Image: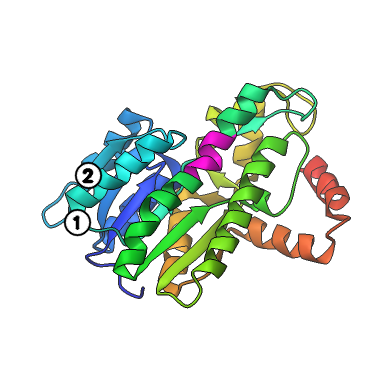
Amino acid sequence: MQSLAGKVAVITGAGSGIGRALANHLADQGCHLALADIDVEGLEATAAPLRRDGLQLSTHPLDVSDRDAVHAFAVNVLTHHGQAHLVINNAGVAVSQTIAELRYDDFEWLMGINFWGVVHGTKAFLPHLLSKGEGHIINVSSIFGIVSLPTQGAYNASKFAVRGFTEALRQELCGTAIKVSCVHPGGIRTNIARSARFYQGIDGRTDATKAAARFDKLARTSADQAAQIIIKGIKAGQPRIMVGADARFLDHLQRLLPANYPRLLGKLLKKS
């Protein structure tokens, strides 16, 4: 999909972070937009500066963990725009807690958004893409869908699941004109750390404010930079889109030391 002009892009989690940055850059590329988020105020803040002549834009308050709501969202998008070309399942949340202490309701909340939200978005739009015979599904995993860290068990589980789901989907659609990409961002400067359900950090501490500040220090890539990398990957039809030098480094580290990377990664984090 070399040119995105005139295409319809569907973006969940568009109210902030990478989702908002993607909306901005896709609009600049001439894409029409169907934007969704559970945060209505954030969604409007994203949409307001993008309302311009020649750009079709619709906003949709949406809880991606609600299957019926996502399927109704797909119907609304196709009714309003007539078609969809890019489906970017981006909405995500975080929980920081050891598996021993992790509550089931926190685990279910996170999986409902991070994993089931991707499944719902894919399943809701896939019949349309198959009937058109073209399109691109972009599912946002994480570098934590490649490596694991203590206190990130729930997040790791969701992002590894997104990766496996997306890679299987890509194989199933091989030979069709529908592209499938899995995105693996490293540390991106967004609000996800501040909006996380934080109980215990990697270092055993429970101060969410300090943890967010530490995340900001480690996160080297802005949401704007991330969006540009993702869009470049979409246009090139890349099956795996690694976002940030840290993501590329950790991907290589895991491949070189699949059993021993946690020990080295632990040492690197203690030095940071």
Q: Which mark is residue 207?
A: none
Which residue is drawn at the image coordinates 37% and 49% (left, top)?
A: 11
Q: Residue at x 24, y 51 (%)?
A: 78
Say which label, 1 or 2, has the lower sequence index. Answer: 2
> Which amino acid, mark 1?
Gly
- Number of the label disc, if any, that sits on residue 82: 1
Could you tell me residue 119's position as x and y percent?
50, 47
Residue 205 drawn above or below residue 258: above
Q: Where's residue 21, x and y in %?
A: 39, 49
* SS label for mark 1: loop
Q: Is residue 114 magenta?
A: yes
Decide: few, some or many residues near mark 2? Use Cα within 10 Å; few <14, some 14-19, many ≥20: some
In the rendered view of the protein, which quadrant contains the N terminus? Answer: bottom left
Residue position marked by numbered label 2 in the rendering: 58
Image quarter in which the C terminus is found:
top right
Kindly tell me whether residue 198 is visible in this rendering: no
Q: Main secondary structure of the magenta part?
A: helix
- The total of numbered circles placed on residues is 2
Q: How is the image coloured?
A: rainbow
Q: Look at the image and tell me whether residue 167 can be seen.
A: yes
Q: Which residues are magenta?
A: 111-118
Residue for point 48% across, 62% down: 229
Task: Describe residue 259's horizontal placement relative to residue 83 as left or right.
Answer: right
Vertical arrangement, residue 136 with respect to residue 122, above or below: below
Residue 157, relative to residue 162: is it above or below?
above
In the image shown, does 143 or 62 lie closer to the viewer? 62
- SS at mark 2? strand
Instruction: Tell which residue pokes out farthest to the bottom in this image.
Output: 175
Q: Nearer the viewer, residue 169 or 185?
A: 169
Question: For mark 1, does the 10 Å Cα neighbourhood hold few (<14), some (14 to 19), or many (20 or more) residues?
Answer: few
- The span from disc 1 to disc 2 (Cα, nearest Å) is 12 Å
